[in-house]
Amino acid sequence: MGIPNHGIDPELVRRLTEDRRWLHAHPELSFEETGTAAYVAKRLDDLGIAHETGIAGTGIVAEIKGRGDSSKTIGLRADMDALPIDEQTDLSYRSENAGVMHACGHDGHMAILLGAAEVLSKRQDFDGTVRLIFQPAEENGNNGAARMLKEGILERFPMDELYGLHNWPELPHGTIGALSGPVLASGSFLDIVLKGQGAHAVLGRSRGYPVDPRVFTVEPVERTRYRPRNRRHSQRRACLHR
Ligand SMILES: [Zn+2]
């Protein structure tokens, strides 16, 4: 499918496609996004946008001021990390880091935010300040956002409102979904440890064989998969067993 233009400068679309593909080819895991951060910082430098690096490790906060003198400030946030997945595609821009892949689309989120940065900084047709937040470690409960908060991001860079974005391929092409408050699932982790003894199968039950209790413990948890707690804040659940 071609890239839809929607009236956006084709040169900008070309640059953002290049950004997305570079970021896709160089994925990094949570809190290891050093190459990613360097790439984003260079792009912000090239656009002449003031920014601070090294926030929560590899995070970046940039600032664009509008033309007016309003003290209102909003934040736009993109996540930066990739997943421990081996990419199995033949794309020309496939992952060059074995075992790591931008399979959640954060490469696209960063490209989108760089696009917003370019448009906002060139036009400055707003009254107030926009802060751009590139957040590390969104995946798997790695809590990049919590670390940014702990490091005082909201005190150092106050924002009246803060907007995040995540791609959602289940929406029809060209559609945007918006909600106030929590959207998408968060990661919650439950460790269940069953202790038993290994034994020959015929002796299992008399030697504390852990398989039966495992079945009875895992099955009820497994049954909750894909059952939204409520429709508005759909909570998707998946279980991993060892
Ligand atoms: Zn994601």
Image (cartoon, helix red, strand yellow):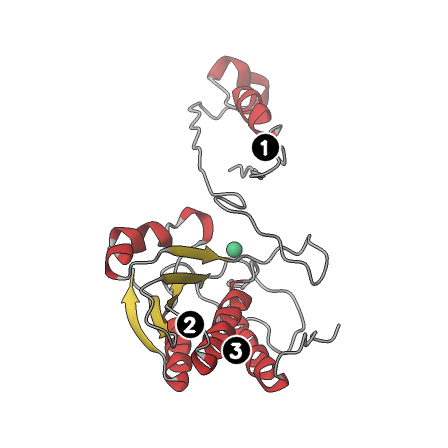
Apparent side of residue 102 relative to residue 194 in the rendered image (left or right)? right
Query: Which quarter of the figure has residue 222?
Result: top right
Q: Which residue is mark 3?
A: 19
Q: Position of residue 141 (x, y in %)?
A: 42, 46
- Of residues 230 and 38, the one nearer the viewer is 230
Q: Position of residue 122 (x, y in %)?
A: 46, 82
Crowd tier of the residue under label 1, counting other residues whose Cα lies within 10 Å: few below 14, some 14–19, many 20 or above? few
Kindly identify the amino acid type of the residue bearing the numbered disc 2.
Thr
Residue nearest the viewer, comparing 232 with 40: 232
* Circle nearer the N terminus (2, 3): 3
Residue reaching furthest front?
69
Secondary structure type for disc 2: helix
Q: Residue at x 54, y 46 (%)?
A: 184
Choose the circle earlier in sequence order: 3 or 1.
3
Answer above or below: position of 61 versus 236: below
123 to the left or right of 221: left
Q: Is mark 2 within 8 Å of ligand 1?
A: no
- Residue appearing at x 29%, y 63% in the figure: 57
Quadrant in which the N terminus appears: bottom right
- The label on residue 63 is none
Pointer 2 local density, CA inside 10 Å: few below 14, some 14–19, many at least 20: many
Q: Secondary structure at mark 3?
A: helix
Disc assigned to residue 36: 2
Queried on whether the Cβ of the residue with tag 1 lies below 8 angstroms from ligand 1, the answer reads no
Q: Where is residue 20 shown, x and y percent of the image?
A: 55, 74
Task: Look at the picture and state if 200 lies above or below 84.
Answer: above
Residue identified by numbered label 1: 230
- For badge 1, the amino acid type reads Asn
